[in-house]
Image (cartoon, helix red, strand yellow):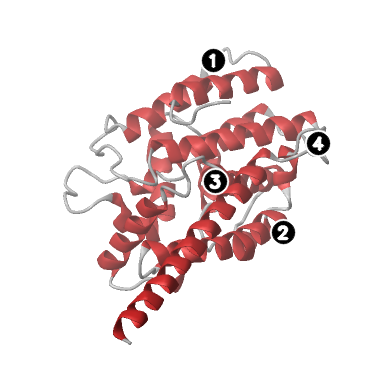
């Protein structure tokens, strides 16, 4: 089991998978891509500050990255067509590593955290990726591919509206969207970190003045109550339909074996339901006790 709190372990797994699929990474691309990510999120790139998010932090990106690497591995091993070439695997890796770079603040930006950019962080991530990859000498067409794939991670994005230039690009982009959702929701501490997510949404709401109802929650409890609906009514449909069911390549053995990501997510949702039920029972008994005292 790879610990996503250890970026070096995730990087090592990405290197292992790449070598198994395409041969040794003689140019050191994988290690270099992770190094760019580390420096950006640690405040060592241009005038950007270190990431200051509690939920969308380094580990969040590592969760999505590990899921992406595994999905690519198992899809290739299943012999699915079209096959993903090494070049697209690499661009996809860059996309998932940079998909939340839009939360990073510049040196002059001293108020609040990057959470205030929640509504625009995808566009900011696209701009950051263009700047970084231009600095690294990437071709314009490859930078544009990365930007389109980053667009796939927007919460309310219409995936059909993204102008993918090839079927390969679309498959990798939808794999990234899938991995971003599954990676975070399957995390062992997902339920505990909902408080951090609520705080980020609250800061965004306070900064923007108003946001879509999907990001406005009255309390952590309210966010928690909506989480099973988010999974059942939004995520499952998105990964199954809009993202073409690519998550099924994570079934091991493929195609009918268990999917560890879905298993862990369902366990997290069950945990949320139990917490909600416990709170509702406590509130009910509290009201009963108050009523008895007043009679």
Location of mark 3 (residue): 180
Q: Would you say the residues marked 3 and 4 are in contact, meaning their CB atoms lie under 8 Å apart?
A: no
Q: Looking at the image, is 119 positioned above or below residue 255?
A: below
Q: Would you say the residues marked 1 and 4 are in contact, meaning their CB atoms lie under 8 Å apart?
A: no
Location of mark 4 (residue): 254
Q: Tell me residue 90's x, y (percent).
A: 58, 30
Location of mark 2 (residue): 241
Q: CA distance from mark 1 to mark 4?
A: 32 Å
Near mark 2 (Cα within 10 A), the count class, few <14, some 14-19 or many ≥20, is: few
Give the quarter of the image for residue 107.
top left
Near mark 3 (Cα within 10 A), the count class, few <14, some 14-19 or many ≥20, is: many
Name the N-terminal-most of marks 2 and 4.
Answer: 2
Name the N-terminal-most of marks 3 and 4.
Answer: 3
Name the N-terminal-most of marks 1 and 4.
Answer: 1
**Mark sitting on residue 27:** 1
- Nearer the observer: mark 3 or 4; the answer is 4
Name the N-terminal-most of marks 2 and 1.
Answer: 1
Name the N-terminal-most of marks 3 and 1.
Answer: 1
Q: Nearer the viewer, residue 159 or 155?
A: 155
């Amino acid at each position: 089991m790879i610990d996503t709190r250890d970026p070096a372990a995730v990087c090592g797994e990405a290197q292992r998978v790449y070598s198994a699929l395409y041969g040794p990474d003689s140019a050191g691309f994988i290690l270099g891509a992770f190094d760019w990510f580390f420096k950006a999120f640690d405040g060592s790139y241009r005038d950007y500050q270190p990431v200051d998010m509690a939920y969308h932090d380094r580990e969040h990106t590592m969760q999505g990255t590990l899921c992406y690497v595994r999905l690519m591995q198992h899809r290739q091993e299943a012999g699915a067509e079209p096959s993903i070439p090494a070049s697209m695997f690499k661009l996809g890796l860059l996309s998932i590593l940079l998909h939340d770079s839009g939360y990073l603040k510049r040196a002059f930006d001293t108020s609040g955290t990057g959470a205030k950019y929640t509504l625009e962080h995808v566009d900011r991530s696209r701009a950051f990726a263009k700047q970084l990859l231009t600095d690294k000498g990437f071709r314009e067409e490859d930078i544009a591919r990365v930007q389109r794939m980053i667009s796939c991670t927007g919460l309310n994005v219409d995936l059909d509206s993204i102008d993918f230039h090839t079927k390969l690009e679309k498959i990798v982009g939808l794999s990234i969207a899938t991995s971003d959702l599954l990676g975070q929701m399957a995390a062992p501490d997902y339920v505990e970190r909902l408080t951090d997510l609520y705080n980020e949404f609250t800061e965004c709401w306070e900064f923007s003045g108003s946001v879509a109802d999907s990001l406005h929650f009255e309390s952590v409890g309210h966010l928690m109550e909506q989480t099973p609906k988010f999974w059942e009514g939004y995520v499952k449909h998105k990964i199954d339909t809009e993202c073409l069911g690519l998550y099924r390549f994570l079934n091991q053995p493929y195609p009918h074996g268990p999917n560890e990501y879905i298993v862990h997510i369902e366990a997290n949702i069950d945990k949320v339901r139990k917490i909600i039920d416990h709170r509702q029972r406590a509130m009910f008994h509290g009201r009963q006790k108050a009523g008895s005292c007043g009679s």
